[in-house]
Amino acid sequence: MTTSARGTEPREARVVGARRTCAASALLIALLAGCKVGEDYRAPEPAPPAAWSESEPVVSPAEPVEAWWSTFQDPALDALVTAALAQNLDLALARARVLEARAVRDAAAGGDDPRLDASAGYARSRRSENEGPSFGARENDLFRVGFDARWELDVAGRVSRQVEAAQAGVDAAVESRRDAAVTLLSELARTYVELRGAQRELAVARANLASQKDTLELTRGRFQAGMASDLDVARAEAQVATTASALPALDAAQRVSLHRIGVLLGRDGNGLGRELLAPAPVPLAPAVIAAGLPADLLRRRADVRRAERELARECALTNAARGELYPKLSLAASWGQRTTDGFELLDAGSNAWSIGPSLVLPIFEAGVLKANVRAQEARQEQALVRWQKTVLTAQAEVEDAVVNLARERERNASLASALAAQDRAVKLANDLFSKGLVDFFQVLDAQRARFQIESDLAKSSTRAVSNAVALYKALGGGWSVADTHEPAETARAQSANARND
């Protein structure tokens, strides 16, 4: 707080002086205000392809379904999605980061507001005896109380650029939360499909094991009747043992998937055993998936939008760094009481005040400020490259998912045909063996081949659905639905910040 000693000039003179000071400050503000350093940000415009390279017969140009998991028509999956959106810990972290970014934005916005501080103090001082002659007492008391105000005018737009950068940081945090939701939904659906796939493979293995055990008992009976050799019995026993060896690994796979689902739901996976360990079919994905056009991908993918917001943030920070090269204009004022006698603190004569502008212009900074600008320009360039890479990666992920889904469905159809043919081969082998036209090895070989094909078909069906999930994820599906599942307090905070913006 800056104050003057008790004034002796007439009150009218002090008022005129104050008016002149305010007028000079207003003139200086008018001359320097209104400038905003740097160019305003413009979002880059990519040139995506007109259509996906391989669309038929897997995807269509229709607008994608946001709640894509509902197209699988599996109530258990729908319930898991609802629980995950409410309880997942990664989403909770992402929400906290959004709140942090908003607080940083609000703090940056406060840098453009006037500040007012109240202060009070007491000091006792003594002058040196060697200071020479002086008037007044050698020892003095000083009592002071009052208010200090300071307002840094955003002359070059430096503060507004910082606020702009902070707001872009909020937008990027929101997109990060949405991207986390997209990843969560796809990971949950994929793990659920793998759980059901493991259950289907386990059922196939158990059915084949039961059939092979029947064959073993029949072979032992034929051996006792002298119609089969001990070699036939040994081969049948080996086949039963080989099939039985696959059961523990499949059971472990379904339990691992169960535990993973528990983590995604933010809870102990053991509590889900009763609900999910009961066998159920693998959900079926739609025959044709609405994928939209490549140009729509940039609007749907949260990671692409986040990369664009991060680029906007770096651009604003670059302009803010350039603003450090320009003058800083501040307006300071103080008012209070100042006296050497505490009993006169409230007297009108103890009143003191000051007001006036200050201008700081950097002249010699040893190149530090310009180096900071160059460093920030390099960060902006990095953000642009990251955005470009994110766009290309998004397009490649969709193309890869479309190809993988189409090829896996072709493979699945071939395996289904192979299984039908192998069923006929098993029947023919049994008929020929019963007539003594082939040995028992032909029967075992046909059964073993059938089990392998049926197991591959189960795996292929699971992989095809997982590839459909990967395609939905690559399309950025689910982020808008996730917004509707935000907690009430977060929704209120979003609404309040939207009004403030």
Image: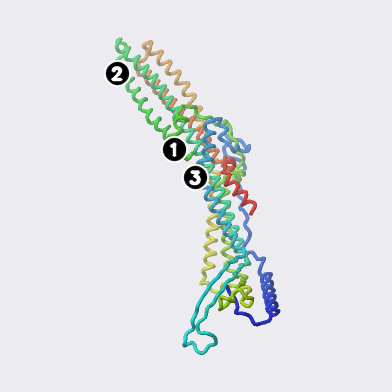
Nearer to the camera, 284 or 108: 108
Pointer 3 local density, CA inside 10 Å: few below 14, some 14–19, many at least 20: some
User: Residue type at mark 1?
Assistant: Asp
Pointer 3 with pointer 2, Cβ within 8 A: no
SS for dot 3: helix
**Quadrant location of the C terminus?**
bottom right
Q: Reading the chain from its start, which is encountered first: label 3 or label 1?
A: 3
The residue mark sitting in front, 2 or 1, is: 1
Give the image location of residue 179, x and y in percent: 54, 45
Position of residue 200 in the picture relative to residue 324 (left or right): left
Pointer 3 with pointer 1, Cβ within 8 A: no
- Which residue is depicted at the point 29% across and 15% down? 229
Pointer 2 with pointer 1, Cβ within 8 A: no
Q: Which residue is mark 1?
A: 268
State the colouring used for the structure image: rainbow
**Quadrant location of the N terminus?**
bottom right
